[in-house]
Image: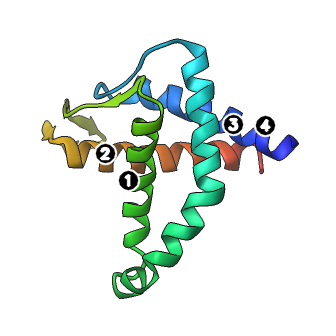
Amino acid sequence: MKRIARGVVINSFSLFLLTQIFSGVNISGGIQTFIFGGFFLSLMGVFLRPLLNLLTLPFNVLTLGLASVFVNVIILYLLTIIVSEIVITPFVFPGFGFAGIIIPKISLNLLFAYLASSLALSVIVSAIQWIIKE
């Protein structure tokens, strides 16, 4: 029970951070929406992710693990269907520059918005788990 509650808190906080990073990720409804989203994201991570990984195993082997990114996109898409207050829309990444590394302004359509959001969500969850040593 403690592990499930920890997963819900981590996923809820990750969804909050995702809304702060990307302008195309909108979550309305307050804190209960973040908690419901974290709960359903945890449930899909436990039950649906292994099934999708098994179904995409041949493609995952052929692409040397790249198909796991699309499993994350599918799970995020299903989350937006289940929790209707979570909406991902196409957005414009304003660009970034640091220490001579420049990423230009990029306009992302809906597919790439889901892809960027799922990658960022995975990185955020992994970073939080690393920080608390889960």
Rounded to the nearest whole Å, what is the CA distance between mark 1 and mark 2?
A: 6 Å
Instruction: Count neighbours of disc 2 (C-alpha within 10 A) and say few if under 14, some if 14 to 19, many if 20 or more.
Output: many
Looking at the image, residue 13 lies above or below residue 74: above
Residues at marks 4 and 3 touching, judged by CB atoms closer than 8 Å: yes
Which residue occupies 35% across, 87% down? 62
Residue 127, visible in the rendered structure: no
Which SS class for mark 4?
helix
Among the two numbered marks 1 and 4 on one chain, the one whose residue lies closer to the N terminus: 4
Which SS class for mark 3?
helix
Q: Amino acid at mark 1?
A: Val
Which residue occupies 38% across, 71% down? 67
Viewer-closest of 99 and 34 = 34
Q: Which mark is residue 8?
A: 3
Rounded to the nearest whole Å, what is the CA distance between mark 1 and mark 4?
A: 23 Å
Looking at the image, residue 28 lies above or below residue 21: above
Instruction: Count neighbours of disc 3 (C-alpha within 10 A) and say few if under 14, some if 14 to 19, many if 20 or more.
Output: many
Q: Amino acid at mark 3?
A: Val
Residue 95's spot in the image, x, y percent? 20, 35
Rounded to the nearest whole Å, what is the CA distance between mark 3 and mark 2?
A: 21 Å
Among the two numbered marks 1 and 3 on one chain, the one whose residue lies closer to the N terminus: 3
Among the two numbered marks 1 and 2 on one chain, the one whose residue lies closer to the N terminus: 1
Viewer-closest of 75 and 107 = 75
Kindly identify which residue carries mark 1.
73
Kindly identify which residue carries mark 4.
5
Rounded to the nearest whole Å, what is the CA distance between mark 1 and mark 3?
A: 19 Å
Residues at marks 1 and 2 touching, judged by CB atoms closer than 8 Å: yes
Q: Which mark is residue 114?
A: 2
Rounded to the nearest whole Å, what is the CA distance between mark 4 and mark 2?
A: 26 Å
